């Protein structure tokens, strides 16, 4: 049974590293005094479940306010059996997770906090009062701020992306004789079996007789524990550690992924934190320092009430380097040893650490890549760049087509534009909407297909009936669901699922196309027996509607400044200088249908050819009806356009419904 709670100031979903660091920071800023908050986590955090290690300069430790958490530090970095080297001004630090959790317990004991030992299920935003609602199995909590540290939700990997695992299994051992140099931590010792992966031992000595010795593996599958124990036994023998006692076993898995994370733009006061916010560096698995820095930024933004848009998508040169390394480790796992050995052998270790924490300038990056297997990295760099061009090429398509259309209009060759549009409609415009029969339950039996077609036609007929009864209502309904559908396809591309934002974008696009062609729009709607849309002079032009629609369209770009939105907006703006049907056609065929087609290809896991085959019967049916209209009546283009609109609306009504549930099912699968 759901139990409704009063409104609290803060809700923390998960009390792991990220949210603990935020609460510490709030405590340091005196923000917990008088605040009410709820912590939802099924785990009581009574165990030392992780060790957090990281390198940092003394000044950073002070700035991040984490000195009191550090259990141990080392000044020298060891690789293999090479002489250890100082990494000053960095030191390597170790924090036991239990130190953090215990400190939190002590802070929380003085606060007005309620613990819910359940899993958070949903988070939703109520735009009317800017409050957020979180549900668990037995509770519903309303709050001003949410800090959500649930595990990451990845988008499915694309061909240029990689999903590997960093898995480790380790022993805390005590030796009989002093064996360890307590100044040196061994970051990577590759003197172990590689087993078709990249494997090394990591050693943290806490005293001359006590150390953590861990076998780590970068690979597609996690490390097997029996195998790891054998390797560790062999390693201890090889290092002649003599007699030792295993006091504790540690294990863990960190995803090393260059896949994108799902964006969850629920509201400005909803914060994704920790690994779910992409704070774990894909190529190393380190996150602690980044989370401590993030905690300061988050708390500052709440303190100043200055909420910045938080982007969890990794981009830029370091994301490119991570992609390259992960792809190489996936495709050539045996080369990992050589790559890391060369990196630490030929490059100053301090610079390597700086590089791994994404702080090196470009020239330094080059000097690092020179030390690595150059041909291998160049091969994967070229592959990554080409795959990027191929992925984004279709984003530029509407822009290129619009430019081409403007040129051919300028040279009075508009027949080319109509021909290109007709070909586009045949090849992609109609086929992208002719796959509905396979969307919800895959390939159907003849009976269920017949039922589906009956239902589909019935929905189209309902729309036709509405048109016949009231063309105005028909038009309004058609516009509303088209806006939704256009917005949904555009924002699916960018993983944005907020229904208000989807609709706003679709509304902005469609009203822009129509309002910037008011005379032509009026001709069509008049032909449907609907009165003209009234318009008055604007500030700069003769049409206020047109000016407002331009402002709204550009506003949506500022609200969600994504690459595909910017490109489609640029192409739409060129459409102002094209006739209405051409402007609409470019958007519909070369942007909307292309997006839809690619979403279907990905969602149904089919090739282009398979999609064409699947769509063929329904595409042919649509062409047949369309030709009947066009040729039988011998209509002029302005007479044909209204009929085409009605036809399109009847056909697209069931299509929009099917695509809506298709997008919903992809979203759930992610
Ligand atoms: C074994 C291991 C070792 C690591 N070592 C290092 C290291 O040495 N250095 C470094 O920089 N990084 C390290 N990392 C990476 C990173 O620092 C950690 O993963 C870190 O714990 C991430 O913090 P977090 O708050 O995102 O997740 P967590 O610390 O895992 O906290 C998430 C919390 O959310 C709770 N939760 C999950 N689902 C729900 C739900 N539906 N409702 C409510 N609560 C939920 C969980 O119980 C958990 O308490 C390590 C990661 C792992 C897995």
Image: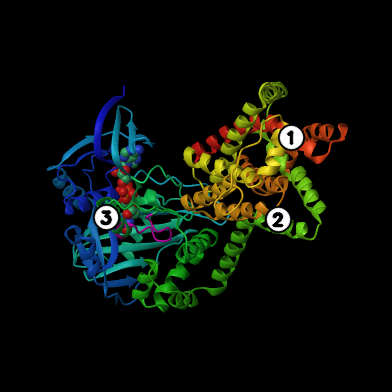
Q: Which residues are magenta?
A: 279-289
In front of the other: 72 or 312: 312
| Secondary structure found at label 2 | helix
Q: Which residue is mark 3?
A: 300
Quarter of the image with the N terminus in it: top left
The reply to whether residue 247 is visible in this rendering is no
The verdict on residue 345 being magenta is no
Please tell me which residue is depicted at 71% across the width and 52% down the height of the picture: 578
State the CA–CA distance, disc 2 to disc 3: 46 Å
Residues packed near mark 2 inside 10 Å, few (<14), some (14 to 19) or many (20 plus): some
Can you identify the residue that label 1 sits on?
Answer: 642
- Give percent across and percent down for residue 314: 45, 57
Of residues 644 and 60, which is closer to you in this image?
Answer: 644
Report x, y in % for residue 375: 57, 73
Q: Residue at x 72, y 37 (%)?
A: 524
Q: In the image, which is nearer the foreground, mark 2 or mark 3?
A: 2
**Residue located farthest toward the left when viewing the structure as drawn:** 110
Dominant secondary-structure state across the stretch colored magenta: loop
Determine whether, in the image, residue 37 is placed left or right of residue 474: left
Query: Is 280 contained in the magenta span?
Result: yes
Other residues around mark 3 within 10 Å, as few (<14) / some (14–19) / many (≥20): some
**Residue 401: which numbered mark, if any?**
2
In-front residue for pair 24/336: 24
Classify 391 as above or below 336. Answer: above
The image position of residue 474, as x and y in percent, is 64, 28
Q: CA distance from mark 3 to mark 1?
A: 56 Å
Q: Earlier in the sequence, mark 3 or mark 1?
A: 3
């Amino acid at each position: 049974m759901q139990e409704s709670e009063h409104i609290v100031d803060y809700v923390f979903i998960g009390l792991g590293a990220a949210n603990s660091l935020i609460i510490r920071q709030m405590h340091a800023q005196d923000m917990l005094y008088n605040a009410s908050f709820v912590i939802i986590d099924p785990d009581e955090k009574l165990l030392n479940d992780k060790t957090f290690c990281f390198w940092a300069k003394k000044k950073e430790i002070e700035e991040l306010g984490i000195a009191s958490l550090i259990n141990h530090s080392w000044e020298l970095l060891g690789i293999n059996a090479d002489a250890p080297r100082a990494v000053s001004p960095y030191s390597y630090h170790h924090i036991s997770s239990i130190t953090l959790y215990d400190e939190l317990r002590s802070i929380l004991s003085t606060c007005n906090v309620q613990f819910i030992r359940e899993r958070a299920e949903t988070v939703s935003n109520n735009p009317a009062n800017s409050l957020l609602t979180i549900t668990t199995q037995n509770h519903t909590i309303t709050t001003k701020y949410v800090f959500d540290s649930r595990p990451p939700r990845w988008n499915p990997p694309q061909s240029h992306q990689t999903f590997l695992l960093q898995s480790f299994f380790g022993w805390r051992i005590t030796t009989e004789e002093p064996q360890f140099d307590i100044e040196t931590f061994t970051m990577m010792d590759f003197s172990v079996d590689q087993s078709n992966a990249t494997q090394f031992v990591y050693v943290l000595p806490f005293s001359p007789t006590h150390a953590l010795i861990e076998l780590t593996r970068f690979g597609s599958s996690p490390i097997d524990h029996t195998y790891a124990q054998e390797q560790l036994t062999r390693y201890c023998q090889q290092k002649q550690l003599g007699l030792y006692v295993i006091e504790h076993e540690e294990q863990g898995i960190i995803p090393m992924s260059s896949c994108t994370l799902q964006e969850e733009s629920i509201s400005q006061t909803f914060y994704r934190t920790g690994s779910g916010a992409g704070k774990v560096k894909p190529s190393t698995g380190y996150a602690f320092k980044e989370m401590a820095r993030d905690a300061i930024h988050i708390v500052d933004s709440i303190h100043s009430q200055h909420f910045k848009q938080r982007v969890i998508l990794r981009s830029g040169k370091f994301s490119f380097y991570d992609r390259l390394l992960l792809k190489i480790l996936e495709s050539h796992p045996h080369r990992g040893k050589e790559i890391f050995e060369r990196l630490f052998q030929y490059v100053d270790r301090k610079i390597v650490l700086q590089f791994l924490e994404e702080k090196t300038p470009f020239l330094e990056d080059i000097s690092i890549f020179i030390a690595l297997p150059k041909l291998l990295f160049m091969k994967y760099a070229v592959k990554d760049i080409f795959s990027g061009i191929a992925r984004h090429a279709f984003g530029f398509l509407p822009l290129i087509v619009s430019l081409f259309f403007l040129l051919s209009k300028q040279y009075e060759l508009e027949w080319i534009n109509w021909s290109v549009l007709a070909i586009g409609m045949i090849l992609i415009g109609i086929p992208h909407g002719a796959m509905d029969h396979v969307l919800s339950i895959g390939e159907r039996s003849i009976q269920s297909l017949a039922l589906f077609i009956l239902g589909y036609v019935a929905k189209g007929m309902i729309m036709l009936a509405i048109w016949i009864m009231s063309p105005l209502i028909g038009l309004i309904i058609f516009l509303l669901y088209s806006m939704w559908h256009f917005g949904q396809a555009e924002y699916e591309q960018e993983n944005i699922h907020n229904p208000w934002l989807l609709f706003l974008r679709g509304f902005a696009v469609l009203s822009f196309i129509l309002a910037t062609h008011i005379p032509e729009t009026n001709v069509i709607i008049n032909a449907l027996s609907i009165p003209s849309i009234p318009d008055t002079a604007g500030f700069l032009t003769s049409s206020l509607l047109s000016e407002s629609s331009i402002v709204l369209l550009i506003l949506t770009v500022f609200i969600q400044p994504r690459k595909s939105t910017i490109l489609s907006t640029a192409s739409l703006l060129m459409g102002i200088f094209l006739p209405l049907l051409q402007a609409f056609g470019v958007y519909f065929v070369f942007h909307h249908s292309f997006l839809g087609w690619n979403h279907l290809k990905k969602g149904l896991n089919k090739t282009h050819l398979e999609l064409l085959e699947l769509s063929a019967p329904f595409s042919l049916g649509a062409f047949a009806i369309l030709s009947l209209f066009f040729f039988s009546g011998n209509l002029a283009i302005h007479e044909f356009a209204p009929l085409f609109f009605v036809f399109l609306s009847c056909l697209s009504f069931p299509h929009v419904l099917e695509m809506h549930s298709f997008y919903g099912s992809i979203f759930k699968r992610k």
